[in-house]
Structure formats: C-alpha cells, structure tokens
Image (cartoon, helix red, strand yellow):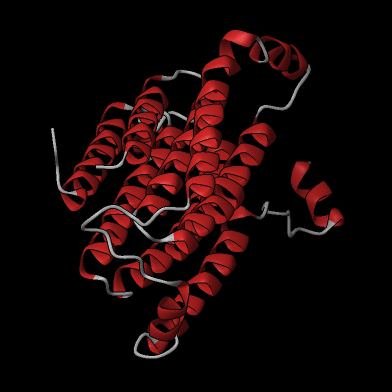
Amino acid sequence: MNLHPTTAGLLLAGILFVLGLISVLIRRNIIFMLLSVEIMLNAAGLAFVVAASHWGQADGQVMFMFILAMAAAEVSVGLALILQLYHQLRTLDSDEASRMNG
Amino acid sequence: MDIAFIVAALIAVAATVRVITCYNIMHALLYLVVSLLAVAVVLYTYGAPFMAVLEIIIYAGAIMVLIIFFVMMLNLGLETAEHEKAWLRPRIWLVPGIFCVVLLGELLYLILQNKQPAAGIQVVPPKQVGMALFGPYLIAVELTGILLMAGIVGAYHLGRQHKKTLHRFLENNLDT
C-alpha cells in the first residue's frame, strides 16, 4: 500500500473527524460531547496543515492557528455553560436539558 | 509513506477510539491527550514543526488541563480519594503510557535521523507562517483577539454564581 502523503494525511483527518462525529451522536454525557467537538476541530486543523504541506503555502498553517484560538475560546465558554447546567440540574445528562421548560 | 507517520496515525486512531468508548471521563481524557500528542507527531512529519509545538502547548497543555481541572472540580466529596485510588491501577494507565513511550521513541528517531521529509511533502517554515499571519491575515488576527476577549467575558458571565441581591432585612421579612 503506497499512498501519496497528502492522501494519507487527508484519510487520517477524515477518520478522526468521523470518530468525533460518531461520539457526538452516540454520547449523552455533555462533557464527552465537548471532547468530541475538540476531536473534530483537531481533525479539521490536521487537514489544513496537510493541505499546506501539499501546496507549500503558509495559509493552511495560519488557519490551523485560528482553529486553535477558536477551540480555546469554545472550551472556556462551553465549560462555563456546563457548570451552569450542572448547578441547575445536578446532572451531566444532555437529555435532561431538553426538559428545562424555558 | 513514512514509517513515523504510519505509527503515529495508528496510535492517534486507536487512542481516539478508546476516547469514544470509555465510560470514565478521566480515562477518556488520558487517551485524548495521547491522541493529541500523536497528531502533533503527524504534524511534525508533514513539515509543520511550529504547529506541532502549538498543538502540544495549547491543546494537550492548556485545553486538556482546563477540562481535567473542571472535571475534578465537579465531583467533590469524600469518595473522591477512593476514586483516585481506584483509577490509578496499572490496567488504567498502562496502555496510554505505552502509547506515549512509543511516541517518544518516534520523536527521538525523527530527531536523530535528521533526514529530509518524504517526497510530496513541502516544509513550510515558521517564518513564512509569521509573515503570512501579520501580512495578509492581519485583520483575521485582530478578529481572533476579539473572539478570545468575547470568550473571556462570556465565560466570566456564565460561570459566576448568582448572589442574592436582597438585603438581610428584606430577606427576613420575606421568610415570615
């Protein structure tokens, strides 16, 4: 099996992204869902870096840095939201949040 | 294809599968750190050493530590110590430890070997990234700064506890 490096990197990014997507869909623990979003963001960044190395341009790595900053902001806000949810409902089950009734 | 890439990719996929099949959040976080380290090695093999370092510092360092700290903050109580004792059995940390040792060996191999990257991969030096970042992408960098500021303010606003605003006197009156 002799793949081109770009093909192999994009395959790896795709596999990681689909694993994160599966985890978002099957998990009901809300921290696990946040982790899965992290996995998906990471896979997208990996695809950007692979494309940057394919074309020899710096733009893909610049996009990776933006994804990194966005992931940091998203985690901080997401954890604050989970903290509020835990204080309100005393659980981390995401199905409970649908019964908040406004 | 490089042997270093294949090993790192296999470790990344295996660790990610363990993340989504673990029931215990701390074990999943341990595997997720290993997965991020493996992805950092993959980034290194694709000619992006600066991005690999950023991946380790920000993802595996800052974000994961934030989540681990948060999880530990949530389950307070007397049973926490027993949980700790139950979690730190060799069966738990052996597999992530082996993965990490393999990644370390791979990193040493890559450093000592000091060869050119594989055909079809072009190294983009950090200097070029910096020139692009503060040249054509300057407005995007400033927008990212605004995004981080909004994240800080949002996290502060959402994370604070709601204090009672009533005066002590009024509160006593309301109780009666």
User: Which of the two residues, A82 or B174, is positioned nearer the viewer here?
Assistant: A82
Q: Residue at x 60, y 52 (%)?
A: B62
| Residue A65 in which image quadrant | bottom left
**Up-down: is A83 above or below B90?**
below
User: Which of the two residues, A38 or A11, is positioned nearer the viewer here?
Assistant: A11
- Mark yes or no: residue B117 visible: yes
Q: How many marks?
A: 0
Q: Please, which residue is most extreme toward the bottom here? A: B135
Left or right of residue B73, residue A24 in this image: left
Q: Residue at x 42, y 72 (%)?
A: B125
**Up-down: is B32 above or below B159?**
above
Q: Estimate the x, y position of residue A84 in percent, counting from the top left.
A: 56, 45
User: Which of the two residues, A83 or B59, is positioned nearer the viewer here?
Assistant: B59
Q: Residue at x 77, y 42 (%)?
A: B175
Quarter of the picture containing the N terminus of chain A is top left
Q: Estimate the x, y position of residue A59 in percent, counting from the top left.
A: 30, 74
| Residue B10 in which image quadrant | top left
Q: Please, which residue is most extreme toward the right here? A: B169
Left or right of residue B70, residue B176 in this image: right
